[in-house]
Amino acid sequence: MKKDIRFVGLDVHAETIAVAVAEPDGQVRSLGVIPNRLESLRRVVKKLEPTQNLRVCYEAGPCGYVLYWQLEQLGVSCEVVAPTLIPVRPGDRIKTDRRDAQKLARSFRSGDLTPVWVPDAEHEALRDLVRAREAAKKDQLRARHRLGKFLLRSGRRPPVGVKAWTVKHREWLRGLAFEHMAQEATFLDYLHEVDHARDRVARLERAIDTAIEAAPAAMRSVIDALQAVRGISKLTAVTVISEVGNFSRFARPRFLMGYTGLVSSEHSSGRRILRGAITKTGNAHLRRVLVEAAWSARYRPNLSAPLKKRQEGLSEEVKQIAWKAQHRLYTRYRKLSSQGKAPQQVVTAVARELVGFLWDIGVHAERAGTAA
């Protein structure tokens, strides 16, 4: 019965865990600070038995979901909660690990906490790989910027008509030489970092292709189906599936839109309704690739050769949704642009509607995979 449930709050750090429990009689007490080790966690669970009456929560953070899986193995129900949605009292000016654990236990008992989705092993592994590739792309951009700014300071300009980071541009870089040894050493180091970043990105992209081939058939079917939409390449589809997980966990498309942070903020009171910029409170990795994909709505609907190839073997229903998405998003882009909206605002609005079509395709592919 609910009156026998004990709600436990854990304030988790790399080396320690502060533990607090909200008793059925209303008392909230601290159980102290324990080492962040499985043996210590097992002792606390044994102290609070029976496990079927325990409900444990902790904040999502850099420690990941290891603690969640450990508690599940011990037979304890656990939830990972969103830290930004934890209620905060305005007058509270004291923050300690013990007080944070007590606040978690108290808020968990009252139902004021918002749980986050905990990925399974396949989704978490794929997400780590995709995010590693994203980090590598950022490092590659920084390396190219360093080299480009060094050449700019040195007065070196590529030949007219040679675009940056093309084959001809690489040949031009290889032929450069500097009078001073210090500049030569700097140039060679920057160039080496650019080459290293390029090889790193290529290596991670090959690993992603291998991971997709080894993924479960249901996951592969969703990845293939998402690529039916114009602007959604393989890497974008993999990023979406690794960050979203199961589309079916969202009852409606607008819930997924809120998860991406692409919905408008609102501050309304009485008859006064004020909507502002997007909330950006959702998944930033997912939001980035969706906005990038939405730029394809600038072009009128068309089935290019690469898109036709990606749609081979897909169901007619998925193809129809993708074709409908092209018309809808193109019309939306043209309409908002004609109203004088900034391009960034237009693309953001288009990305929000793109989420609805991806949800529709994802749910259909998941149901088809389940039926198979």
Image (cartoon, helix red, strand yellow):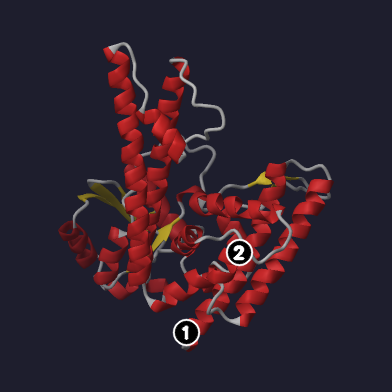
The residue lying furthest to the top in this view is 180
**Quadrant housing the N terminus:** bottom left
Residue 349 location (% of width, % of height): 70, 52
Badge 1 element: helix
Give whichever of discs 2 and 1 has the lower sequence position: 2
For residue 97, which quarter of the picture? top left
Badge 2 element: helix
Residue closest to the eye, 214 or 278 = 214
In front of the other: label 2 or label 1? Answer: 1
Residue 168 location (% of width, % of height): 45, 36
In the rendered image, which residue does mark 2 sit on?
Answer: 255
The residue lying furthest to the bottom in this view is 371
- The reply to whether callout 2 and callout 1 are in contact (CB within 8 Å) is no
Residue 350 as seen in the image, left or right of residue 63? right
* Amino acid type assigned to the residue bearing label 1 in the image: Thr
In the rendered image, which residue does mark 1 sit on?
Answer: 370
Residue 28 visible, this angle: no
Residue 188 in the image: above or below residue 195: above
Residue 146 in the image: above or below residue 181: below
Q: Disc 2 and disc 1: Cα gap in Å?
A: 22 Å
Residue 17 in the image: above or below residue 92: below
Which residue occupies 47% across, 15% down? 155
Q: Residues within 10 Å of mark 1 (few under 14, many from 20)?
A: few
* Amino acid type assigned to the residue bearing label 2 in the image: Phe
Residue 12 location (% of width, % of height): 31, 50
Which residue occupies 54% across, 53% down? 289
Residue closest to the eye, 86 or 317 = 317
Residue 209 as seen in the image, left or right of residue 244? left
Which residue occupies 34% across, 28% down? 190
Residue 138 visible, this angle: yes
